Amino acid sequence: MATRIRHLAPHDLQAGMVLVQALTLVEHGIVTYTLPAGHVLTQENQHQLASHHAVCVQVEQEDTRTDSQREADTLRQAGRLKMIFRHADLSPPENQALVQALLTHRSA
């Protein structure tokens, strides 16, 4: 089974999804909510994440896309990044590495 890492808002989460990284929510310098990496989300967790104003949660999902859909997604993301960086000087290796990292992240 192929999986992909997704960054989802709390309202897009579903019970049964697995956290990729440990989650720590902090408000005014105080830790208000934590969940460990590998935690299987429950409906109660979803409510807690929303009530603690979580913005984004990194979860692992089954990747149901076909190889051609994955390739099309990668090409679409490459086009978007090309548009975003159209005025940037991409000759320095640091800039090339940044664009490649963004493409890898967006295509996951």
Image (cartoon, helix red, strand yellow):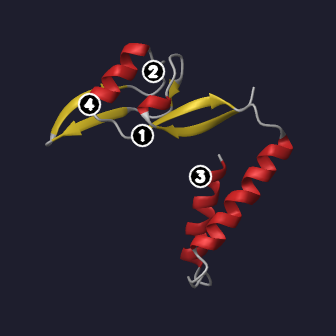
Q: Earlier in the sequence, mark 4 or mark 3?
A: 4
Please name which of the two marks, 2 or 4, marks the residue nearer to the observer. 4
Q: Amino acid at mark 1?
A: Cys
Left or right: 95 in relation to 104 = left
Q: Earlier in the sequence, mark 2 or mark 4?
A: 2
Q: Earlier in the sequence, mark 2 or mark 1?
A: 2
Residue with the mark numbered 2 = 39
The image shows residue 73, relative to residue 103, as above or below, that is above
The outermost residue toward the front is 11
Label 2, secondary structure: give it.
loop
Left or right: 4 in relation to 74 = left
Residue 65 in percent (x, y) is at 77, 36
Label 4, secondary structure: give it.
loop
Residue with the mark numbered 1 = 56
Residue with the mark numbered 3 = 105
Picture residue at 57% right of the left edge, 83% below the top: 87
Q: Amino acid at mark 2?
A: His
Residue 60 in percent (x, y) is at 58, 31
The outermost residue toward the right is 68
Label 1, secondary structure: give it.
loop
Please name which of the two marks, 3 or 1, marks the residue nearer to the observer. 1
